[in-house]
């Protein structure tokens, strides 16, 4: 965690931005870079009867860190995704509860 | 948004229903058809040691619009998915908070 | 439901554990084994500019059943995933609201 689901850019672009973006996100969260996971789903997007490019909806699954960090986190992702030439980026946060998150069988609120 | 994750029908079936379904959903939400995204994950489903057909669990990721619209929205999706010959359809809604949703780096509650 | 998203092990490993794991989960939940769905996303994971193995983040999408059942449920999944040789497993629960879940167009809270 944070677990970040990337859409809207290619695998190669994701690889290119992954290192500097994770370094920036780790600085924002004040945590190590090895906490971050990037997942690129192999989905097909459909609109109006046709396959269309993947829509740049980025989902951040994490433990809530408050609005200030969330704003900076979203803005860092947006900057790097837009840096690949994408014109519009949507970033959303899905907060996990520590009471419903288990690492090796142990609850994170214990 | 809304971002709709389709499972349980084929890509071709998704393409066929995409246009009339989005038109109906846009009328229910009173918004433009270009707000809708359909994502078809390329997942494998497993049951009892075997690969099985994709289970028709449809996830709607959106900003909550209230029960009346939610009911109509679920029923429209159900009708179109069942129209492909599927016998059982489950539709669930995942609400995003506007305070945790960013378009081009700007929070949607600002 | 429950709908379980498996990551971090292979499809073959998922098939091998699917039957005994579902039997154990069904006993914990006191429900039939045919309520369970296992989904294995075909995603690519990226870290530090490289493709890396899928991270063992398991997501359980369900109706909340309380902490005691949740603990047992997470521990059963953890045990089977670790039994494949994985060293670290993270299990998280995403609760659906019955008021926003529809089976064949009918709300589950009605």
Image (cartoon, coloured by chain):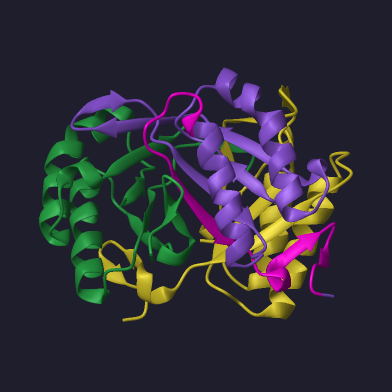
Chain colours: A yellow, B purple, C green
Looking at the image, residue A68 lies above or below residue B3: below
Depth check: give the residue in front, B82 or C94: B82
Looking at the image, residue B106 lies above or below residue B88: below
Is residue C53 found left or right of B99 in the rendered image?
A: left
Q: Residue at x 88, y 39 (%)?
A: A85
Q: Quadrant of the C terminus of chain B?
A: bottom right
Looking at the image, residue B109 lies above or below residue A62: below
Is residue B80 found left or right of A15 in the rendered image?
A: left
Q: Residue at x 71, y 38 (%)?
A: B22
Q: Quadrant of residue A41?
A: top right
Q: Residue at x 41, y 29 (%)?
A: B86
Is residue B110 found left or right of C31 in the rendered image?
A: right
- The image position of residue B91, as x and y in percent, is 48, 48
Depth check: give the residue in front, C10 or A99: A99
- The image position of residue A89, as x and y in percent, is 80, 50
**Residue C46 visible in rendering:** no
What's drawn in magenta, residue-wise?
B82-109
- The image position of residue A66, as x and y in percent, is 65, 80
Q: Residue furthest top?
A: B12
**Residue C70 visible in rendering:** yes
Q: Residue at x 54, y 47 (%)?
A: B75
């Amino acid at each position: 965690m944070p677990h970040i689901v990337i859409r809207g850019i290619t695998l190669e672009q994701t690889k290119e931005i992954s290192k500097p973006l994770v370094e920036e996100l780790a600085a924002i969260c004040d945590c190590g870079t090895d906490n971050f996971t990037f997942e690129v789903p192999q989905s097909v997007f459909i609109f109006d009867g046709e396959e269309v490019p993947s829509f740049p909806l980025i989902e951040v699954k994490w433990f809530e860190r408050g609005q200030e960090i969330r704003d900076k986190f979203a803005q860092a992702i947006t900057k790097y995704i837009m840096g690949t030439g994408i014109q519009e980026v949507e970033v959303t946060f899905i907060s996990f509860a520590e009471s419903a998150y288990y690492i090796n069988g142990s609850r994170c609120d214990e």
